[in-house]
Amino acid sequence: MMSQDYIALDERFGAHNYHPLPVVIAEAKGCKVRDPEGRTYFDFLSAYSAVNQGHLHPRIVAAVKSQLEKVTLTSRAFHNDKMGLFLKKLCEYTGYEAALPMNTGAEAVETALKAARRWGVEVRGVPNGKQTIICAEGNFHGRTLAAISMSVDQDSLVNYGPYVPGFVKAPYADAQAIDDRIDENTVAVIVEPIQGEAGVVVPPEGYLARLRKICDRHGVLLIFDEIQTGFCRTGRRFAWQYEDARPDIMCLGKALGGGIMPISAIVADKKVMSVFTPGTHGSTFGGNPLAGAVGIAAIEVLEDERLEENAERLGRLFREEADAIRCRKKRLVRGKGLLNAIVFDDGFQAWDVCVALKDEGLLAKQTHGNIIRFAPPLVITESEMKEATGIIARVLGRF
């Protein structure tokens, strides 16, 4: 079958809830993918940062193969011999006392929201049903009803009411606005350290540290959604480490699964995590032994290959190269590590640029119409980066 045949099947039998680029990926390795016709492309999306370790990293694949011959699923009705090892590794890597495993990023966010609401009643003393959580405008925390209830994006919200109550919105990157909205019913503040889906919006220096101080002063929890920014993507293990603004709860996902399977979790110290008791929260697949084996290998690759250093160094190279590109429609370049974006003039349709990049051998995707996010796997080499930025420069020069 050819690429157009696979696309036709997707369009005939699938719900039209995505608008993908007209390309089919049939094989992948490292930072490159291949279509059914054998054409190779640089992957500069990394499945929205779920493939930080590169496609089919051999150590992660070996862990999968080994575990597949033993046991893959037990449910949490029983212990298994991988979950404890995985949780220990995750806690050591993140620096927290406890972890609660789930599957998708949206589940991690839901788990954090539930933890905060319950903590608010049992520790802060807020009457049940009165708890509020402050979130940031422009956020993207997933597609569940609770997640979209925090959103201001009309495409995410359209006709899905009634929406979940208890969320108070504040402008992103404005710490004072959050401070002003905290009251006796506030239990937590949740933000992304860098807003990815909004177009790689980087807050001003000091914003995260100020949020930490504000939450400490008011006695409320600080939650950072590091699902896209975590696991070395921004040039640190986690983006909050740029300001030493350690949150009370951190939402994790995407790259925790090593590009192999969905794995997510929240991490927190026990003074927060202890609000969960048997029967109050759970997941059939959360903490399954296959996920445990994958998660351990995924973290070990990040550690042993020092991928945060590669992301920081090559991220600077990308921004330098992108800043130098001559393009009449380009407005600015922004990002940290290997999470970057090129912002074009308002009203410009970056879809056309993405199609042109695809035709030249590089895959990236626009967001909010006039922004393209560039996030290659963190295993990319300097020579590969220079080849890729050469493609970007060549294409942008036409616009």
Image (tube, rainbow, N blue to C red):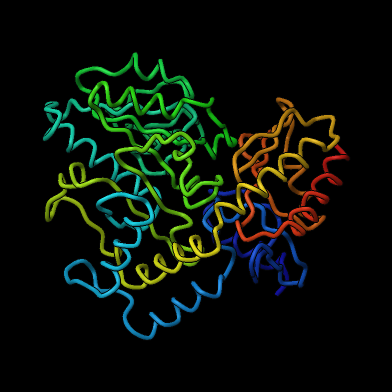
- Dividing the picture into quadrants, the one containing residue 46 is bottom right
- Dividing the picture into quadrants, the one containing residue 337 is top right
Image x and y of residue 313, in percent? 65, 48
In the rendered view, does 60 fall on the left or right side of 71?
right
Residue farthest toward the bottom in the current orientation of the protein: 69
Quadrant assignment for the C terminus: top right
In the rendered view, does 382 fall on the left or right side of 184?
right
Image x and y of residue 13, in percent? 55, 61
Residue at the image point whose x is 83% and y is 44% from the top: 393
Image x and y of residue 61, in percent? 50, 75
Quadrant assignment for the N terminus: bottom right
In the rendered view, does 359 fall on the left or right side of 189?
right
In the displayed structure, 369 sits above or below 90; it is above
Image x and y of residue 38, in percent? 76, 72
Q: Relative to the observer, which residue lies in front, 26 or 382?
A: 382
In the displayed structure, 66 sits above or below 56; it is below
Q: Relative to the observer, which residue lies in front, 124 or 303?
A: 303
In the rendered view, does 192 fall on the left or right side of 336?
left
Q: Relative to the observer, which residue lies in front, 296 or 170?
A: 296
Residue at the image point whose x is 44% and y is 62% from the top: 299
State the count of labels.
0
Residue at the image point whose x is 50% and y is 45% from the top: 229
